[in-house]
DNA sequence: TTAAAAAACTGATTTATGTCATATTTTATT
DNA sequence: AATAAAATATGACATAAATCAGTTTTTTAA
């Protein structure tokens, strides 16, 4: 037994990245048989910048945080968040054998790990798969570039407003989301000091634009938030 | 006659993007026969954000400037530079039918234009080509993300130093490069006001780190520039 | 359950950077 | 060659944002 079950697991996986639908049954079977399923606790490091690339990861549940480390690991910039159905590590494919960005678990995460050699073999053998991967890579990197270009164009209030809106719309898909998203995370995402984050989040709460309690962010006045994001 | 000559032109083109070496003779012939060669004068707009995607462009000579426009086109951020051998428009493939970023000629440019439908057809039919395009896309977008993340982490002196180094190493491939690179261009690339650019460039000249005259930038003290880029 | 550590908060102060006004130089146009 | 227009330069000033210091709250660990 075992093996057909495993294939079914992958076939029926509701969080499968779109590109896997382009694989033949045999190819999917190969993925299913060799993939590893891993659970990470909140805060754990999933992938470390500077190590050898060994796999492509699929987020099944939870949210992962992609960030760049500078010099002494004190300094970081958050680059992206990955949610269920998204692949981690596409940016390294055929580009660098060294992992470009660290990834950690923002919340508890379940991931599937696919050997990078298998992934690259599939790319080389299946053009539909490759085309879909191009689509994913473009989608991801355009979003990243867009976010950061817009972010750096804004003043601090605008940055926080923008970040909250993007988190709500593109990461958590909800107007109120529960996540251990610290002031430092906000600071590292928006390129500002955590003191400033604290101050601005407070004005947003005072102005009844958002509500925050024990890690839950709730958007109360989206229109206002959008206005601040645009102007600020 | 004509047609074989045209094919040879493409076959022997020294500025061909790497991926075209993956095409079969017939495929390359198809590109050669339908491609358009266009000349742009410095400052002319090559591709306008918000229009329909119609082509992929190859830079044959000159440097093109990729930038994002905000609200009223007053505000811009420079995102990337494209030099000979690089493709423009890869980020739009299979992602958006609308051009994401405007492109203009930083210097006089010669470009080849390839119909987007032909390009996508090639991708769908030739997996080696597709894999090489993935490589290019990753290379380009990683560089863009890297530059902007690093840039925004630095203070103003560091930003200018970093920008000059990147221009020298990755765009112009020389320690002294002649380009109409205005203060405003610097400002739009590094996310700072042009007044600050002026000031900092002056201190760099006073400190004999660079020399600038009529559009020519010359790095005099690269070690110092690297130090400022790292620390600042 | 309590102690210790980390994160969040707040005000005062300093610093970095942007804005404004004006002068000068360079480039483009007639 | 002359004029207009744009880009560059420079100082004075305003303001945004970071840092510092100290307190409170929350989380983690014993």
Image: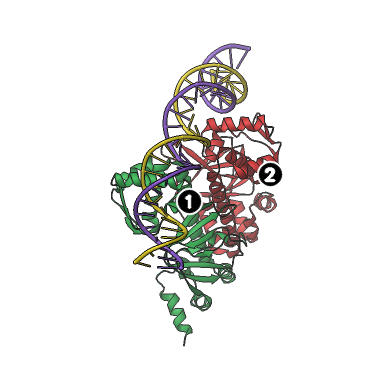
Chain colours: A green, B red, C yellow, D purple
Pinpoint residue D29: horizontal percent, then vertical percent: 46, 66
Label 1 resides on the chain identified as A
Which marked residue is nearer to the observer: mark 2 or mark 1? 1
Pinpoint residue B223: horizontal percent, then vertical percent: 70, 42
Q: Residues within 10 Å of mark 1 (few under 14, many from 20)?
A: many
Please name the residue shown 33% across and 44% down the image.
Answer: A203
| Callout 2 and callout 1 share a chain | no
Q: Residues within 10 Å of mark 2 (few under 14, many from 20)?
A: few
Q: Secondary structure at mark 1?
A: helix
Residue A24, compared with residue B168, is above or below; it is below
Question: Rounded to the nearest whole Å, what is the CA distance between mark 2 and mark 1?
Answer: 32 Å
Kindly identify which residue carries mark 2: B173
Q: Nearer the viewer, residue D6 or A211?
A: A211
Which residue extends farthest bottom? A1
Q: Quadrant of the C terminus of chain B?
A: top right
Please name the residue shown 40% across and 59% down the image.
Answer: A180
Pinpoint residue B73: horizontal percent, then vertical percent: 44, 36
Q: Nearer the viewer, residue A128 or B170?
A: B170
Residue B53 visible? The answer is no
Q: Secondary structure at mark 2?
A: loop
Q: Residue A188, labelled with which disc? A: 1
């Amino acid at each position: 037994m075992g093996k057909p079950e495993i294939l079914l697991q992958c076939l029926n996986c509701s969080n499968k990245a779109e590109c896997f639908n382009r694989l033949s049954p045999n190819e999917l079977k190969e993925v299913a048989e060799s993939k590893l399923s891993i659970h990470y606790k909140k805060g754990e490091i999933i992938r470390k910048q500077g190590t050898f690339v060994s796999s492509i990861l699929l987020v099944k549940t939870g949210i992962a945080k992609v960030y760049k480390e500078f010099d002494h690991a004190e300094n970081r910039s958050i680059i992206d968040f990955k949610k269920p159905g998204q692949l981690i590590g596409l940016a390294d494919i055929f580009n660098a054998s060294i992992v470009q960005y660290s990834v950690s678990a923002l919340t508890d995460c379940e991931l599937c790990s696919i050997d990078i050699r298998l992934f690259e073999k599939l790319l080389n053998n299946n053009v539909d798969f490759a085309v879909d991967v191009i689509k994913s890579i473009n989608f991801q990197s355009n979003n990243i570039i867009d976010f950061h270009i817009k972010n750096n164009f804004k003043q601090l209030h605008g940055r926080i407003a923008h970040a909250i809106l993007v988190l709500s719309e593109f990461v958590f898909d909800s107007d109120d989301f529960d996540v251990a998203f610290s002031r430092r995370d906000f600071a590292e995402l928006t390129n500002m000091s955590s003191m400033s984050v604290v101050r601005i989040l407070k004005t947003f709460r005072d102005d009844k634009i958002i509500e925050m309690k024990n890690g839950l962010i709730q958007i109360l006045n989206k229109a206002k938030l959008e206005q601040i994001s645009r102007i600020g």
